[in-house]
Image (cartoon, rainbow, N blue to C red):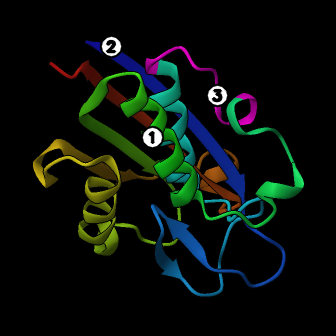
Amino acid sequence: MRIGTGFDVHAFAPAPRPLLLAGHTVSETQGLAGHSDADVLAHAVVDALLGALALGDLGSFFGVDTEELADADSMVLLERTMAAVTERDHAVGNLDATVIAQQPRIGPHVAAIRSALAAALAVDLTAVSVKATTTDRLGSIGRGEGIACWATVLVHPVT
């Protein structure tokens, strides 16, 4: 068994843009800034998977600010990462992720987010934990400037 951790953070975009978490639309107008779709949760999970198998990080695996990734769907990047996991004869055991945001409220979206991640990771819903917390108005996230996410994933050899 191998464990990987991932972290990502994005500032809110200056112009209206959808806020996506694991491909699920949380807000139509209050999205995050980024070269791709800025899905902070999908990015943290990708980094955790890549870390578990010592494959680098999102930037080194896919390239940084490449034309190919402009406005890329981060769930497609997660699918491509899962293909790399499968090619190395591994599967996901479980995922534990924490979204850190002062706003908007994530709780009402957790069930849909978990379902999307379970499908992308090819695991049962019970193997996916997604939690949300705030920073009690401390720091840049507490001031509502962005959102961060931590993810931890266990992968195991397929026997």
Question: Residue type at mark 1?
Answer: Ala
Element under label 2? strand
Cα–Cα gap, marks 1 and 3: 15 Å
Give the number of the disc on residue 57: 3
Pick the front one: 54 or 152: 54
Compared with 103, 91 (above or below) is above
Q: Quadrant of residue 90?
A: top left
Give the number of the disc on residue 2: 2
Q: Earlier in the sequence, mark 1 or mark 2?
A: 2
Residue that appears at 54% across and 58% down: 76
Question: Residue type at mark 2?
Answer: Arg
Q: Position of residue 153 (x, y in %)?
A: 34, 30
Element under label 1? helix
Q: Quadrant of the C terminus?
A: top left
Whether 59 is among the magenta residues is yes
Compared with 85, 23 (above or below) is below
Question: Does the rendering let one see residue 135?
Answer: no
Residue that appears at 28% across and 58% down: 119
Badge 1 is on which residue? 83
Are discs 1 and 3 less than 8 Å apart at CB?
Answer: no
Cα–Cα gap, marks 2 and 3: 16 Å
Q: Position of residue 106 (x, y in %)?
A: 39, 67
